[in-house]
Amino acid sequence: MQYGLVSVTKVDVSPDIKSARVFISCFNCADSADFIKKLNTHASEYQRLINEQIRLKYTPKLKFILDDTIEYADRIEKLLKQ
């Protein structure tokens, strides 16, 4: 399965550093909802990798969220050009 261009657009970390919402942009993805689901399935593995690289009091629990801002802007731009 091909996912196109994927990037992290924003990360919101809670004040107590126990959770983080990671916003993912998936431009030209065939099934971006499936991609986000897969990321959330493996979130604990990513949390472990972060813990190995950065020493924090808490390693945030990750929740991946689809950020469709780029696709929305692209859709608006196409509409404006018509």
Image (cartoon, rainbow, N blue to C red):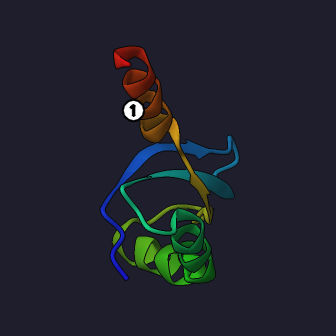
Q: Return the x and y of residue 11 as percentages of the image width and height.
A: 51, 45
Residue at (51, 61) in percent of width and height: 56
**Which of the 4 quarters of the picture holds residue 37?**
bottom right
Picture quarter with the N terminus: bottom left
Q: Residue at x 43, y 70 (%)?
A: 50
- Is 3 placed left or right of 33 in the picture? left
Residue 63 image point, x, y percent: 64, 62
User: Where in the figure is residue 27, as x and y percent of width and height?
Assistant: 37, 52
Q: Is residue 21 above or below residue 15?
A: below
Q: Quadrant of the C terminus?
A: top left
Q: Residue at x 60, y 66 (%)?
A: 33
Instruction: Pick the residue in front: 37 or 17.
Output: 37
Placement of 72 over or under 39, stated as above or below: above
Which residue is pictured at 45% across the width and 23% down the height? Answer: 79
Q: Is residue 17 rendered to the left or right of residue 55?
A: right
In the picture of the structure, the residue carrying the numbered disc 1 is: 74
Q: Secondary structure at mark 1?
A: helix
Q: Nearer the viewer, residue 69 or 64?
A: 69
Q: Residues within 10 Å of mark 1 (few under 14, many from 20)?
A: few
Instruction: Name the image quarter holding residue 12.
Output: top right
Q: Residue 32, relative to residue 47: is it above or below?
A: above
For this rendering, which residue is in front, 81 or 29?
81
Q: Residue furthest top?
A: 80
Count numbered badges in the picture.
Answer: 1
In the orientation shown, which residue stands out farthest toward the left?
5
Please name the amino acid that badge 1 sits on. Answer: Asp
